[in-house]
Image: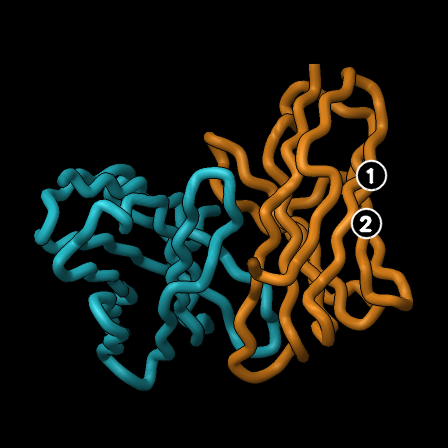
Amino acid sequence: QQQVKQSPQSLIVQKGGISIINCAYENTAFDYFPWYQQFPGKGPALLIAIRPDVSEKKEGRFTISFNKSAKQFSLHIMDSQPGDSATYFCAASKTGRRALTFGSGTRLQVQP
Amino acid sequence: DSGVTQTPKHLITATGQRVTLRCSPRSGDLSVYWYQQSLDQGLQFLIQYYNGEERAKGNILERFSAQQFPDLHSELNLSSLELGDSALYFCASSASSGGRNTIYFGEGSWLTVV
């Protein structure tokens, strides 16, 4: 059973545009929601994370929006750059169980 | 560089064979996780060890096993390999199991079963 659903599967954005990736989860016990960025040939690396006690977290050009009632969260990449081209994974876990459940990934391509 | 080291980086083996993947976690990290990444299944959690003991088990096949040694390095053993086991296997580590500890991933071990 897929507990974290991610969309879209792929995304093409022009340089300077906004990239938006959405995730929905099923398990209401999840209380930690990170986003990971993966470049070809590399392992996933933590980009930004949020907990359900806040509705938004911003770090530079990256923002997570969190809607607890809808059980959804999204990643917004402002002023997208070609260097942002990578695969992005949302994930979720619950306190006491550190293993992450990942979404299926979104391949982002930012065109110059 | 995440600080998590995995060997080998690439491995080609035949069906029915057995392989061992090795992982050295970041210095000081007590938890080790194994994930499998394939095109059709995404990142699937296999198993977690914390300070030498199994902490959580995910979608790990009975043909697969893992352990974490006293020096905290971990090995993932894959046996009776099938073509479908071809994937990228990631090791990850984090500090203690509680709190807001980031999980750091290695660069993975590419396994090709022919």
Q: Residue A77 sits in which quadrant? A: bottom left
Tag 1, which secondary structure?
Answer: strand
The total of numbered circles placed on residues is 2
User: What crowding class fits label 1: few (fewer than 14 Cα within 10 Å), some (14-19), or many (20 or more)?
Assistant: some
The dot on residue A33 is: none
Chain corresponding to orange in the figure: B
Q: Which residue is mark 1?
A: B20
In the depicted view, which residue is nearer to us: B2 or A74? B2
Badge 1 sits on which subunit?
Answer: B
Report the quarter where the C terminus of chain A lies.
Answer: top left
Residue occupying the point 36% across, 69% down = A48
Counting from the top left corner in percent of width and height, residue A47 is at 38, 64
Counting from the top left corner in percent of width and height, residue B68 is at 84, 60
- The lab-note entry on whether marks 1 and 2 share a chain reads yes
Q: Report the colour scheme.
A: by chain
In the depicted view, which residue is nearer to us: A99 or B74? B74
Q: What amino acid is found at the position of numbered circle 2 in the picture?
A: Glu
Counting from the top left corner in percent of width and height, residue A55 is at 23, 79
The tag earlier along the polypeptide, 1 or 2, is 1
Chain corresponding to cyan in the figure: A
User: What crowding class fits label 2: few (fewer than 14 Cα within 10 Å), some (14-19), or many (20 or more)?
Assistant: many
Identify whether A5 is placed above or below A68: above
Identify whether A98 is placed above or below A54: above
Q: Are marks 1 and 2 in contact (CB under 8 Å)?
A: yes
Q: CA distance from mark 1 to mark 2?
A: 6 Å
Badge 2 sits on which subunit?
Answer: B
Residue occupying the point 71% across, 62% down = B25
Q: Which residue is mark 2?
A: B75
Question: For this view, does B2 lie left or right of residue A19?
Answer: right
